[in-house]
Amino acid sequence: MIEVQSYLEEIQQAAYENRKLLAVLIDPDKFDISGALDFLQILPENVTHIFVGGSTVEEGRTCTVVKAIKNLCGLPVILFPGDHSQISSHADALLFLSLISGRNPEFLIEQQVRSVEKIRQTDLEIIPTGYILIDGGRETSVQRVSNTIPLSQDDIRQIVNTALAGQYSGKKLIYLETGSGAKFSVSSEIIQAVKEVLDVPVIVGGGIRSTQQLQSAYKAGADLVVIGTAFENDSFRV
């Protein structure tokens, strides 16, 4: 019997082979379901995953959006939830996020505990993920909702130590992000410094609006890059 890789194992294998992955992030509250087919048809050919989630989402909206996408698309749909309400059994996997850059217990463990009963009723693959919010030049919705201060891009040592603490505590992925609407993305210096010390794949998102920024993130060591709808702009061609 052939053993099928889990979604985490696929990401780990790609990182080991230096195959770069690309995810498109869909915010359920901003996604027009009536235009879902058109949206999916213009996705870049090298998109490997679809992430679904937002800082604040109307109750039940995530499930509606996930079902619409799954009916039209064969790509893995992975939840990137802002809170415990954004869980859908129709998705393939869940990034079980812990905001390790902040010290607010609500997003370190309390939201996770509140999600457990719902998760246990699903067949979602659960992927423990350390989420590190980094300053992107302006206050983002993630910062406001989580009531945490992003780490300074100048304090690379603190970011590296936070990433390592996440790995040591059992996180299988480390997610570096400046947040939706950030003026600038995670610097190449930070990505490289984090990648050099970790044994787990590195995800990078926030503020990536051009092919040049995407390639810079890959070159610095990002294993999976997350973009929003920037690919719809003329400045983004992959």
Image (cartoon, helix red, strand yellow):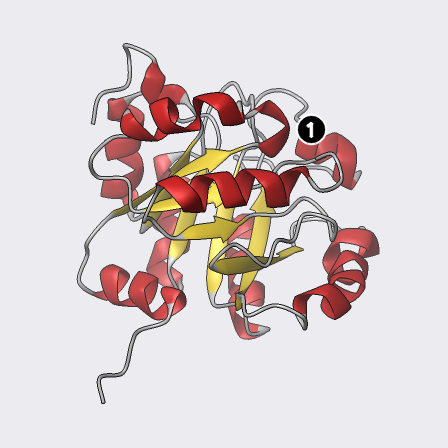
Task: Tell which of 124 and 16 is nearer to you.
Answer: 124
**Please, which residue is most extreme toward the top here?**
234
Q: Quadrant of residue 218?
A: top left
Task: Indicate whether 15 appears above or below 27.
Answer: below
Q: Is disc 1 surrounded by few (<14), some (14 to 19) or many (20+) residues within 10 Å?
A: some
Picture residue at 49% right of the left edge, 60% below the top: 93
Picture residue at 58% right of the left edge, 66% below the top: 165
Name the residue type under label 1.
Answer: Ser
Task: Indicate whether 195 appears above or below 8.
Answer: above
Whether residue 42 is visible here, answered yes or no, is yes
Q: Is residue 74 left or right of residue 181?
A: left
Task: Indicate whether 217 appears above or below 116.
Answer: above
Q: Position of residue 40 (x, y in %)?
A: 34, 31
Picture residue at 19% right of the left edge, 54% below the top: 19
Q: Position of residue 139 (x, y in %)?
A: 68, 23
Q: Which residue is mark 1?
A: 141
Picture residue at 66% right of the left edge, 26% below the top: 140
